[in-house]
Image (cartoon, helix red, strand yellow):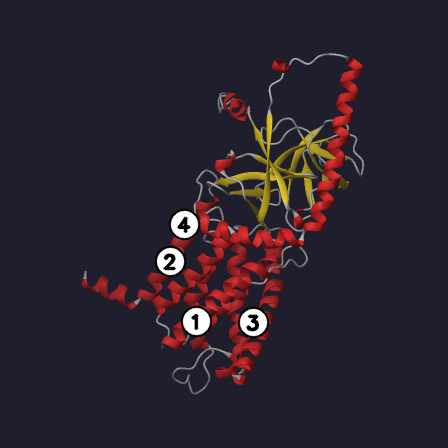
Amino acid sequence: MRALFLLIYKFHFFFFFLVLEVFCIYLLVQNNNYQRASFVNSSNVLVGKFYDEVGVFNSFVNLKTTNKNLAEENARLRKLIADTSMSSKAVKVSVNDSLYKQQYQYITAHVINNSINRRSNYLTLNKGRADGVRREDGVIASNGAVGKVKYVSEHFCVVMSLLHKDTKISARIKKNKYSGELRWEGGSATQASLNDIAVHVPIAIGDTVVTSSYSPIYPEGITLGTIAHFELKPGQNFYNITVNLSTTFGNLTYVYIVNNLFKNEQVKLESEIPQHD
Amino acid sequence: MINQIVSNLIRFIVLVLVQVLILNNVQLNGYINPFMYILFIMLLPIETPGWLLLLLSLAMGLTIDMFSNTLGMHAAACVFIGYLRPRIIRSISPRDGYESEANPNVTDMGFRWFISYTIIMVLLHHFVLFFIEAFSFVEFFSTLFRVILSSILTILLIIISQYLFTSNKQQS
């Protein structure tokens, strides 16, 4: 026993190093584990407040581009209103509201921290549980999809960006509805790759890629980007497609958190499928 | 002694702010990212006891992690170089050893000693950091490429900051 203590004393520097390093790796693995929310990240109140202050400054600097984006979006929404009133007049059907249930709620949020230069990127938004944000909610910007909510605190939430190594989005080609999977391979923040599109599907450069109706996170038809180029390696059954992302992740300021009111119902029903089927 | 503590504390705060507010937003060619905050670990006095060195490295790493949502990543890399620091300092010691109360910076040790110290520390730190971030050896060469490019940037920043800092010191 004495010898053991002597040994530990002799190499105490090494043992202490080992203990701390194991602690760090434990934190790392714990934090990567998707199911366990970690509380020491930027949704914690102190760090969140700090970034909120910095965000005020940043949003002032970006005011010009933000105004432009908002104006563009206003124009688009105005057009939508005009379209709907026209069509309802033409058809002349009075809509009984009780036939329709609202499926998506939108919460506007301000981006107070954002990164695009890592292999796994996150955003922090200034809305939290108190505003109705829940884990796994989708996040979109005026020009495309952004990511999904990973951690929620009382007044902040952290969003796993589309630019993350674990992000997989169910996407489809708008013109012919064939669906595949959008992933970010790292590198440029403006491009991602679309997999699982079979060789018989007719595609062309410039085709729009949107979210599919299969995912409970995003509404159907949110723009993801356009096809930049595609290639077919000999002997493969699927295209390698590169997509130019429509969201500009570098200057995100205001985003919408999408709350799918029927998500729990869909996920619960789908989880009833036995695993071994 | 008190002077040492205060100056190291100020250096800690300034380097965290510089890293979080400026350097984390630097994007060159995708994801090349300088990590200058390790200057704090590098500049701790030579006679710092081992356990304190490890604890301060851990504190620095965890602080950076909290601001970049990468819990454990920077901390692991920092503790790693904190552990290797005494060995590195011993292995590149000048012929007649270190003077007592010498600090591992340009003013006390000279440019040639400091640059080899910086290159070893930065390369080790970045190597561990980027491979923990990738968490696999699948993209080995692309990760190695990032390690080397980011290291060059960090080393340049550290050397430049050393000269800015020393010139201030001589004026005062």
Q: Counting residues from the N terminus, which is met first, the one under dot 4 or under dot 2?
A: 2
Amino acid beneath label 1 = Asn
How many neighbours does mark 1 have within 10 angstroms: few (below 14), some (14-19), or many (20 or more)? some
Chain at tag 3: B
Task: List the residue tagged with mark 3.
Answer: B158
Q: In the shown orientation, is residue A127 left or right of residue B95?
A: right
Q: CA distance from mark 4 to mark 2?
A: 10 Å
The amino acid on which the numbered mark 3 sits, given as a three-letter code, is Ile
Q: Which mark is residue A26?
A: 4
| Residue B33 seen from this side | yes
Q: Is residue A89 above or below residue A239?
A: above
Residue A231 visible in the shown view = no
Q: Quadrant of residue A171?
A: top right
Element type where label 4 sits in the image: helix
Task: Judge whether A99 appears above or below A217 on screen.
Answer: above
Q: Which residue is mark 2?
A: A20
Quadrant housing residue A24: bottom left
| Label number found at residue B122 | none
Q: Type of residue at label 2?
A: Leu
| Dot 2: element | helix
Examine the rendered structure and indicate whether residue A217 appears above or below residue A114.
Answer: above
Q: Earlier in the sequence, mark 1 or mark 3?
A: 1
Q: Nearer the viewer, mark 1 or mark 4?
A: 1
Looking at the picture, do discs 1 and 2 lie on one chain? no
Residue located 46% across and 46% down the image? A31
**Label 4 amino acid?**
Tyr
- Contact between labelled residues 2 and 4, with CB atoms less than 8 Å apart: no
Residue A36, given in percent of the width and then of the height, sits at: 44, 40
* Residue at image point 35% right, 64% down: A14
